[in-house]
Image (spheres, rainbow, N blue to C red):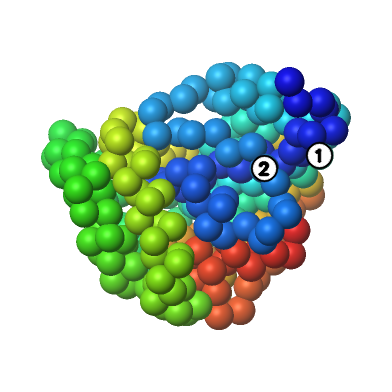
């Protein structure tokens, strides 16, 4: 059994569609984290228990990326004083905070989840089939609108291979977690931002067309406690993740 000294002090919450493999694809060598798999739906209480089990005693840093940001916020509320710092990278803010959908590359999917949930589930099941049988093709679709530094990332064969594997291992295994979290996010409101009273740092690429800069600005204004917004020039979505983790 690993000693406390061998355990990470960081818990990472991946995006959707995504998986724990995002960490290996984007984190610099030597930076370790516990990254719970949310391919299947996992409630906040369970995630909080997993963080306590897999992270060293003492303060823990939580990192939420994209649709993992609202999950990290909820886990931070559950863990309370155990959390030393919360980092939200390319964060998906509640849609009730502004008219963000027209500027979001995936805006149509969130509209569908809100207005026609049954059809959204069918689309998610189809994408799960594609992720299982042709993950490279789905990766191409996801990065078809790549902007900023994500454009170069989308042409990097190592990154493409890593992300294709993330899609196959996650969404390709089951769409259940993706469906649950996108549905919950589409219905989220400002009440989901209550607490936690810990230092929060937002990392936002100024070329991000998945979670646009206006979303991070609205989130920074709505969150309680000390909030710092770091803008990352030329970065988009995954390039912001890489840049933020490099600075951590």
Q: Position of residue 7 (x, y in %)?
A: 76, 33
Residue denoted by label 2: 33
Residue in the image at 74% along x and 38% along y: 8
Q: Secondary structure at mark 2?
A: loop
Residue denoted by label 1: 84
Q: Dividing the picture into quarters, in which one does residue 135 lie?
A: bottom left
How many numbered badges does the structure rendering display?
Answer: 2
Left or right of residue 129, residue 226 in this image: right
Against 58, residue 247 (above or below) is: below
Foreground: 38 or 202?
A: 38
Q: Dividing the picture into quarters, in which one does residue 202 lie?
A: bottom right
Left or right of residue 133, residue 106 in this image: right
Residue in the image at 18% along x and 43% along y: 129
Q: Position of residue 4 (x, y in %)?
A: 82, 27
* Residue 193 appears in view: no
Q: Position of residue 217 (x, y in %)?
A: 59, 62
Mark 1 neighbour class, 10 Å CA radius: few under 14, some 14 to 19, many 20 or more: some
Between the residue at mark 2 and the residue at mark 1, the CA separation in whole angstroms equals 15 Å
Against 35, residue 2 (above or below) is: above
- Badge 2 or badge 1: first in the primary sequence: 2
Of tags 2 and 1, the one toward the viewer is 2
Q: Which mark is residue 65?
A: none
* Residue 211 appears in view: yes
Q: Secondary structure at mark 1?
A: strand
């Amino acid at each position: 059994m690993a000693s406390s000294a061998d355990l990470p002090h960081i818990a990472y919450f991946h995006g959707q569609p995504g998986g724990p493999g995002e960490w290996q694809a984007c984190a610099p060598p030597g930076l370790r984290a516990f990254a719970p798999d949310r391919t299947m739906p996992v409630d906040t209480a369970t995630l909080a228990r997993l963080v306590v089990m897999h992270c060293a005693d003492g303060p823990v840093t939580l990192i939420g990326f994209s649709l993992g940001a609202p999950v990290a916020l909820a886990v931070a509320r559950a863990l309370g004083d155990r959390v030393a710092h919360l980092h939200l990278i390319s964060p998906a803010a509640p849609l009730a905070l502004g008219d963000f959908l027209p500027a979001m590359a995936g805006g149509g999917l969130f509209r569908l989840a809100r207005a026609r949930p049954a059809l959204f589930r069918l689309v998610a099941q189809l994408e799960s089939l594609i992720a299982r049988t042709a993950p490279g093709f789905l990766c191409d679709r996801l990065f078809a609108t790549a902007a900023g530094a994500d454009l170069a990332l989308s042409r990097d064969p190592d990154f493409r291979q890593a992300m294709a594997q993330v899609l196959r291992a996650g969404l390709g295994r089951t769409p259940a977690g993706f469906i649950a979290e996108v549905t919950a996010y589409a219905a989220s409101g400002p009440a989901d931002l209550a607490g936690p009273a810990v230092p929060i740092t937002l990392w936002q690429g100024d070329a991000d067309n998945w979670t646009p800069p206006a979303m991070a600005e609205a989130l920074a204004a709505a969150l309680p406690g000390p909030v710092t917004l770091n803008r990352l020039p030329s970065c988009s979505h995954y390039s912001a993740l890489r840049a933020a983790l490099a600075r951590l």
